[in-house]
């Protein structure tokens, strides 16, 4: 279950703070914004992640084989943490069945960010995970 | 285009410098640019070239006691960032310089008065598309000789606030209106850090910190606008003793900076115990 995500959180936990920061920045650099065929500005508020001060949005598409593909936008240029998490969620969860993604836990935020989780960011980042989970649950209940 | 800092009518305009000024001084050996953010990833993602990172949790706070670093800790920090007693430190950061002002305030506890804030902070620098670097600079360690921390002129403890209440001193609550009213125990979108009661210190005026800022570029408002906000609309006097507070003293250090330097409040202190202390303390009055 969520094997790639588990491997990634395990890897993050092995790193010291400096390496973890570098790794998070590496993911933030890999962030790809939602393509125009999925969504264009102004993005629909219904896709906005509540409580996220980085102004993040999330979309999902369910493939015929039941697997999911996630897309993100982060409107705040300082939203480095949100971009890093979006890239991580896409790389580790896209391609999995909705029913599997529906089991994802917000605990991953603390495991990934550790000391890099600032006061304001934690709530927003957990809300991103919850938004991904909610989309998976909706897709899973809609065969 | 923003009004130049020297034309905004501030009482002490020299504590603010423009992004232009910083760009011209990034290689000045007598200047050390310091980034202080809430988001600890931001500095690593790109910063003003040559700027060092001072983290409010790990660099400025004692790691055991709820208190700031000691004189020895400050000396070690200044040595680490290559600053001498003669170095002019210039702070900037995210959230409209919220944490930059907090770091500035902590530096004042040690009497390092050669200190400035870059008006507009990271937001303005970024919007102006000025150079950013991921290179972490390395400066030769210095021998910095700090004074013992002198809290009294700048910092209020809970007993000071209680004494201040008895003399009906001015209090400024810089949190959100919901926190002031007691309908919310934390900042919007922030975790609840466990205050038992909601409300405000009796008699405190509610002036959310960000009202001092032009939100589009993060710069401080003009003295005329600040006077209207603090002196006219909220009837605060620069001649009366004043204490600002928020949740842990970070937002209120921004207001402390505006009142002390931009409007010239003569006796202004920051109560860093703030609502996480007052909202939990036994036997103290609150208002809703």
Image: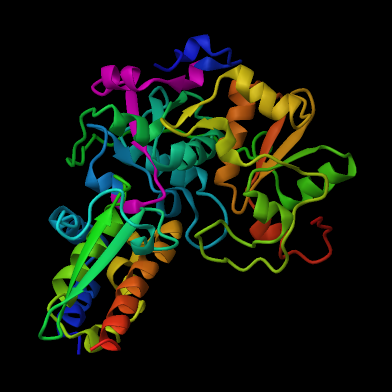
The reply to whether the magenta stretch includes residue B8 is no
Q: Which quadrant of the figure has residue B287?
A: bottom right
The reply to whether the magenta stretch includes residue B35 is yes
Residue A20 in view, yes or no: no
Residue B187: x and y in percent read 56, 56
Residue A140: x and y in percent read 26, 87
Name the residue located 10 percent from the left edge and 86 percent from the top edge.
A65
Residue A113: x and y in percent read 31, 66
Residue B215 in view, yes or no: yes
Q: Is residue B132 above or below residue B272?
A: above
The region drawn magenta spans B14-41
Residue furthest to the top in view is B7
Residue toward you, B273 or B127: B127
Taking the image as shown, residue A12 lies to the left or right of residue B98, namely left
Taking the image as shown, residue A111 lies to the left or right of residue B11, namely left
Name the residue located 64 percent from the left edge and 21 percent from the top edge.
B263
Residue toward you, B277 or A94: A94
Name the residue located 41 percent from the left edge and 54 percent from the top edge.
A53
Quadrant in the picture for the N terminus of chain B: top left
Quadrant in the picture for the C terminus of chain B: bottom right
């Amino acid at each position: 279950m969520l094997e790639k995500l588990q491997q990634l959180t395990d890897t993050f936990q092995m790193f010291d703070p400096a390496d973890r920061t570098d790794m998070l920045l590496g993911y933030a650099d890999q962030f790809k914004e939602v393509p125009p065929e999925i969504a264009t500005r102004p993005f629909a508020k219904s896709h906005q992640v509540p409580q996220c001060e980085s102004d993040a949005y999330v979309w999902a598409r369910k493939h015929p084989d039941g697997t999911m593909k996630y897309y993100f936008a982060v409107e705040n240029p300082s939203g480095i943490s949100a971009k890093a998490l979006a890239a991580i969620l896409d790389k580790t969860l896209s391609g999995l069945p909705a029913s599997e993604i529906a089991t994802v836990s917000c605990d991953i935020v603390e495991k990934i960010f550790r000391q890099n989780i600032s006061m304001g960011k934690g709530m927003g980042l957990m809300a991103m995970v919850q938004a991904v989970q909610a989309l998976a649950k909706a897709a899973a209940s809609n065969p | 285009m923003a009004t130049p800092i020297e034309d905004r009518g501030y009482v002490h305009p020299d504590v603010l410098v423009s992004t232009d000024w910083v760009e011209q001084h990034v290689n000045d050996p007598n200047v050390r640019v310091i980034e202080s953010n809430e988001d600890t990833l931001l500095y690593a993602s790109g910063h003003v070239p040559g700027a060092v990172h001072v983290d409010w949790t790990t660099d400025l706070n004692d790691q055991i006691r709820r208190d700031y670093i000691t004189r020895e800790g400050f000396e070690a920090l200044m040595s680490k960032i290559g600053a001498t007693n003669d170095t002019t430190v210039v702070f900037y950061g995210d959230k409209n310089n919220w944490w930059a002002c907090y770091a500035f305030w902590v530096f004042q506890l040690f009497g390092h008065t050669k200190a400035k804030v870059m008006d507009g902070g990271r937001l303005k620098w970024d919007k102006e598309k000025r150079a950013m670097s991921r290179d972490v600079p390395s400066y030769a360690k210095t021998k910095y000789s700090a004074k013992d921390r002198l809290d009294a002129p700048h910092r209020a403890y809970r007993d000071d606030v209680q004494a201040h209440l008895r003399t009906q001193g001015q209090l400024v609550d810089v949190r959100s209106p919901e926190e002031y009213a007691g309908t919310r125990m934390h900042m919007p979108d922030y975790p609840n850090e466990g205050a038992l009661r909601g409300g405000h210190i009796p008699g405190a005026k509610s002036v959310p910190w960000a009202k001092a800022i032009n939100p589009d570029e993060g710069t401080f408002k003009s003295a005329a606008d600040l006077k209207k906000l603090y002196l006219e609309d909220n009837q605060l006097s620069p001649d009366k003793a004043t204490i600002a507070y928020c949740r842990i003293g970070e937002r209120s250090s921004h207001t402390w900076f505006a009142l002390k330097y931009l409007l010239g409040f003569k006796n202004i202190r920051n109560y860093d115990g703030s609502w996480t202390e007052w909202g939990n303390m036994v036997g103290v009055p609150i208002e809703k």
